[in-house]
Image (tube, rainbow, N blue to C red):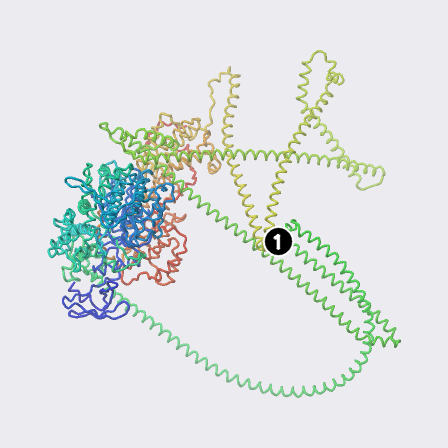
Amino acid sequence: MAATAPALYSKFARVWIPDAVEVWRSAELTKDYSPGDAALQLQLEDGSELEYKLNPKDNTLPPLRNPDILVGENDLTALSYLHEPAVLHNLRVRFIDSKLIYTYCGIILVAINPYESLPIYGEDIISAYSGQNMGDMDPHIFAVAEEAYKQMARDERNQSIIVSGESGAGKTVSAKYAMRYFATVSGSSTEASVEERILASSPIMEAIGNAKTTRNDNSSRFGKYIEIGFDRKYHIIGANMRTYLLEKSRVVFQASEERNYHIFYQLCASTHLPEFKALQLGSTGEFHYTNQGKSPVIDEVDDAQEMQATQRAFSLLGIHERQQLDLFQILAAVLHLGNVEVTGRGSGNCSVSAENCHLTVFCELMMVSCESMAHWLCHKKLKTATETLNKPLAKTEAVDGRDALAKHIYARLFTWIVSQINKALRSSSMQHSFIGVLDIYGFETFEINSFEQFCINYANEKLQQQFNLHVFKLEQEEYMKEQIPWTLIDFYDNQPCINLIEAKMGVLDLLDEECMMPKGSEDSWAQKLYNTHLKKSAHFDKPRMSNKAFIIHHFADRVEYQCEGFLEKNKDTVNEEQINVLKSSKFAFLLELFQEEENAQGPAGTALSGRTKMARVGQSLREHKKSVGLQFRNSLNLLMDTLNATTPHYVRCIKPNDHKSPFMMDPSRAAQQLRACGVLETVRISAAGFPSRWTYQEFFVRYRVLMKQKDVLSDKKLTCQNVLEQLIQDSDKYKFGKTKIFFRAGQVAYLEKLRADKLRAACVQIQKTIRCWLSRKKYLRLRRATVTIQRYVRGQQARALCKSLRRTKAAVVIQKYQRMCAARRLYQRKRAATVLLQCLLRGHAARLRYRQLRYEQKLLVVQRWARGWLARLRYRRTLQALVYLQCCVRRMLARRELKKLKIEARSVEHYKKLNVGMENKIMQLQRKVDDQHKENRELLERLNVVESSSVSELKKLRSQIEALQGVEENARHLGDQVSTLEEELGLTREELDRNRKMVEELNEKNNLLKSEKDELNKLIKEQGQQITDKLQKDHQELIEHLQTDLNEERTRYQNLLTEHLKLEELHADLISEREAAAHMSKPGHVRTDSAYSSNESQYTHCSEFTGSEVSLQGQEEDLQGAVDVALLLKLQRRVAELEQEKLNLQSEWDSREEQLQQDHAKELEECQRTLGAERDYEAQKRQELESDNKRLKKDLNELRVSLSVGKGSGRASPGAPAYNVLLEQLSSITEELEVRKEEVLLLRTQLVSLEAFKYKEGASEGDSADTSRSPTLDLHELNEDGELWMVYEGLKETNRLLESQLQTERQDHAEELQALRAQLQALREERDQQQELLTNTLKLPQDGRMHAALQHEISRLTRHNVDLMEQMDKQDKTIRKLKKQLKLYMKKVEESDQIQIDQPILESRASEALSSVSIIRKERHCQGMLECRKEDESKLLRALITDLKPRGVAVSLIPGLPAYIIFMCLRHADYTNNDQQVCALLNSSINSIKNVLKKKGDDFETVSFWLANTCRLLHCLKQYSGEKAFTKHNTPQQNEQCLLNFDLAEYRQVLSDLIIQIYQQLIKCMESVLQPMIVAGMLEQETIPVVLGLKPTGLRKRTSSFAEESSYTLDSILKQLESFHSTLLQHGNDPDLIKQVVKQQFYFICAVTLNSLLLRKDMCSWSKGLQIRYNVSQLEEWLMDKGIQVGGVREMLEPLIQATKLLQVNKKTEEDAKAIATMCTALTAAQIVKILNLYTPVNEFEERVSVSCMKSVQALLKDRQESPQLLMDSKTVFPITFPFNPSHVALESIQIPASLNINFLTRL
């Protein structure tokens, strides 16, 4: 790198410089660096200038910054420059900008705690990572778990996942998710009960081992190692847990802002429960052991709910409620023990009162003596050689003893719980392999570090040593595999530090030695440490200012430990007498905690006891005296032996900040943890070797632009070697491996710089050429424009000259005409003046004459007006009187009308009339307009009358004025009244004007009414249209909603069917396992594979299931654990649920059938009532007709009389002959009518009296001889022919019949009256409701009234329609049922009639020798049938189903041949009325198909073949069922071949369920074939070669878990789809079914591709989006070729299409964000944000998504109502529908080939 340093440190190069706050800051060189320069000229990101001085000793340059395209990589080893600032920056970009919490660093997974719930741990994410290689997907804890699982299966080697980190970094959560992954993907042989128990152990361990600290609200205060066991099929069979170094001191002491273990707070939060009343607990503030931290509450955590979760977990793990209560009783006793107060002063004077309430409660709960416990809390026993002494304790010693007892009890309880969990997780079967998950504390350093931190850091030293050795082992294997010379790399070896701690005379050894000394102390132990290791070990040091502390230089940091408390914590002493008091308790559970046998039975114990087994009673004290440090060292060594025997996987958890803020990173804290967990050491080791590694193909594709054409050879490896030798001169900077090229750190960045320079030069060349072309094009355009401008300018000049000449000529002409106009104007002016003078003179003379005449005329006018005034005065008085009289009359009429209207307005009927509809209002308005018109006409007529009367009056006045001219006195008086007359005239004129105005106003009102009418009509039309549109919209929405519900119901039903089939298969497997276990001891026994067990019929599965459960329960002891009891109980519950569901369905069916019968009875009653009403109507009509007949008779008689009178009078009439003819015709018709009536009456009488006559005749024959007194004899004597007697008896019977009819009519009338009353009552109620609704409606505004009325009417009509539809459906069902019954009855009647008819014929014609003749059945009933004997059924099914090869049948014969043959056999069984054969044939066929699918369920051709045949058999059962819905497409011959005797509707349902099962199996086959092809063909294949190439990859991408599989391409997917499609067509599957299969295929392709895209950062780029879009277009073309692009198939690819568009569109501005939100409708908001976060430029010319654009997109998408799920559910199977598809193949034309070997069938 030194050779290339001057080239790399050039102007604009970016470097990292140290910073006190941000640790590292980015800066840019403003000047090229030259060797020998003392400083670098830099510019910071904020724009400030800085001179960075170099170290003059070594002249070390600051680390270079990686190119932007390498920032944000999944693997830190993919970075070209590997150093601390590059690692920090890459993690910060991924964590803060991209919201990615996982990053690889070689073999390490770095996990940063987001302090926020993320949707990346669901079942869909687990499914996406299952089966994937480590580097194929984005970093994730699931990827590490999958890698461990696959390596266990491939290498058959145990695995370990080591999760470490400091408190609050997320270790426990990471370990929990890893275990959840194993529990989900592996499955178990006992139906997931083991997985549930493993996951249930987490809440228990968190409750008893986790607590709140200042750094974490749920900090694990112990380490644990869980071994998850697997069998040979790699299913989980059990687990085992080991714990390490429980922090017992937390039980008795908590620092500020911390809490005790969660279980104590859960107990105190549940004191209100009745089962906890006896514990006498209170709030956490009342107990000393829970109130020291002053922080009893955790935000967003409910301790009461957590207690319920803990109890559920205990129950799931087999710890019953009694044990739980005992356990909580001991925990409560510990709390009360902490409140026991010790009193006293000085040494040996302390005491505890036996009446102390808390001590009393403690002793009651522990069932021990209160006096003994109070005594030994303040005393201890000393043993000497000769005697035993009781020594009083000081107060501090007594308090320490009390706390030690509490810690010891809690530790025992913790150990017991762990042992119980291990018992619950232990499996009886043999463990083949295991995966261990180690959740252990990380490196810790505080201001005061004690014994716990020492042990933790000691464990991390051991783990770091194991990690270093493993890393070097992997590096050595990689170099040896690629045949690269191995060179030793210097690394930090922490073995001396480990020796300092655990070797002989080490820290732990000296600590144990000091603990064994009678008067050992921390001071003497510290002096021993100083004397032994100070200045002798490089890792040991002494603080300057302390003699009670020491310093150890760990691999991560130097830590100062305080010696205080080391001895006490290491000895962990407890007063033995206190233990003896507890052992004397009557509490059985407490005694169990202190029994040695329980420890011996524990699986591995805790870290305090390791796996050491204690055997005898005497060993308890010795074990108890064993030091904690020794126990921890032994358990740690055992752990390291386990880890060394496994393949480790590392997860390093990082805490980003101390404030628990989401997605915020403190660089200093992150750097500190990266050093402590070994990540930076791993980076340093990787950087010392060859960290960057490329395959030859990847290198060739990426750096093809640096090669010349002559350098490109056919051998890619030789080409790369030649190019590298030219680009990098120093051969030590790279090495050529067998399949890869190895680069030193920084070389990839150097190559990227060369590549960028080359691309930049190419871009400049392209820009230069394009700019030249643009400039030339612009010049040519300007030249053409210039020529055009010149041409137009010259033309303009010529036109201007022409215009000037024209103007000159025009000016001369204008002057000529202007002079002529001036002369003419002067002449006209003079002439006009002369004429004017003449006019003025003549006018003056005329005016004088006019004045004289006018004066004379005025005198005449005055006289005329005076006379007129007098006449008008009389008229006006008369008119006023008339008007006043009219007003009074009209006022009276108006008041009456107003009163009437008010009465009507108060009535309900008026409101009803007002609300009848807008049409009535319009009609009223129209009538009102007509009335106005009429009134206007009347006013006009009145006006005319007034004018005419005024004219007549004026005439009279004129005559009177002429008569009074001679009277001078009257003239004087009239002169005085002239002024009055003038005023009256003015008033008359004003009144006339008012009348005119009134007319105008009436006209305006008329116009307004017309306009209002038009508006109302328009409003009614608009509202009607709106209501129609709304009804149509609601109807459409209802249809869509019903369709959605139907699909959901189908999906739910098909899922239940799948679950039922799984239970059936599991039942069969359990039966086979039971049989195998029962015969295990027999020699030569071979176990039958459960996969080939038979599958029973659906009709018998319930009973068989129950029988198997009983047998399983009876043989439980014989099986000896072969069948899991939990599974058996679960199956029993499931069977009970199924039986209960069956009973519920049966009861529901019975109730519906009963309801149907009741409805049918009601309908019959209604029909009878209707018939009665019709009968009454006919009787009434008959009476009316009779009355009409009488009336006509009367008219006819009158007509006759009139005609006869007219004829007798002899008056001649032209119509007399016609009248006579009519009379004759009427007479003949009348006579005939009378004759007919008499005949009818006679016949009625005879029919009615027939029975009575027979009875009378029989009675007369049986009477005695004395018949003379019989009235019948007298009648016979009177009328010998008996006619009179018959008439008399007929009349009596008629009377009786009429009486009975009358009674019947009365009863019917009473019933009808009652029904009418009930109906009237219902109508009254409805009327009341309508009135109430009307009242409420009238209270609303005008618009609201109409809307409310319409809503009410719509709802009423809807209810009525629904009721009618329900009645129609019920009637249809009843009709269909009755038709079926009628068919059966008709068949039986025909057979019985035939027998009854044939029998007398045979008897009567026996002599004619016809006994040999038999009844020949018509040939049409026998065509298309095959006869199969009962003994041949098994051979038939074996030939048609079991041994049949689908490929031969599909190619050579018609599709669906087996289905046709089976159905023809069914037809014969139906024809012969053999129900047993029908059931046996159908059940055997269904079971045989299930067995074939179980054996060959992974063969697509077999599944497709039987899907087609099962569908065809179902369609045949429908087509020949005889139902009209299915027979309308049949030919007449096919209708004659319908089934006669049996209704196979139930078997059709069974076949439908079987089709669903086969369809789901078909989908699984397709998915298993397509799964490995999709990602390789749709994402990874370079279908469009691009110059951008690939980005560098890291270690994870280089080392896949499995060997490279055969590469798939897009052509492989298309060929496979073509194969699927052709197979489905060959087997004759329905087109709709094929379309559904293709839709499911494309959904699966889209889901898998999009899910992989969402989890792969390397695929989210512009070039990849282009390639994926091209691949999708190829799929669309395939759909178009097959003609199945409609029906929602193409829409399945829409999410993937929109994802590719999202990768290609601009993502900078707010407009781009709006376009993205509008475009991506098929993607969820989470998917859009995820793709934008993952978008990574492949080239430095591309840009990342801007922060503003990202925020804008999130703001636009926040209102979407969507599922929060990130990935598409690839396991979704759409509900299948198989529409009826009738066959046009005639059954009689089907030819059976001899190759099927079914010659035993007989064709009929």
Q: Amino acid at mark 1?
A: Met
Q: Most extreme residue toward the right, as rendered?
A: 966
Left or right: where 949 falls relative to 342: right
Query: In the image, residue 985 lies at what x, y percent?
Result: 77, 72
Query: In the image, residue 1064 lies at what x, y percent?
Result: 35, 35
Left or right: where 79 falls relative to 954: left
> Can see residue 1646?
no
> Can see residue 249?
yes
Query: In the image, residue 1329 lies at what x, y percent?
Result: 59, 46
Rendered image quadrant of residue 66: bottom left
Q: Residue at x 87, y 75 (%)?
A: 970
Of 622 and 852, nearer the camera is: 622
Q: Most extreme residue toward the top, as rendered?
A: 1265
- Quadrant position of the C terminus in the picture: top left
For mark 1, what is the residue? Answer: 918
Query: In the image, residue 1400 lies at what x, y percent?
Result: 53, 18
Q: In this picture, is 1082 found above or below 903? A: above
Of 1479 and 599, nearer the camera is: 599
Q: Residue at x 46, y 47 (%)?
A: 1041
Rendered image quadrant of residue 787: bottom left
Of 1597 and 1382, nearer the camera is: 1597
- Quadrant position of the N terminus in the picture: bottom left
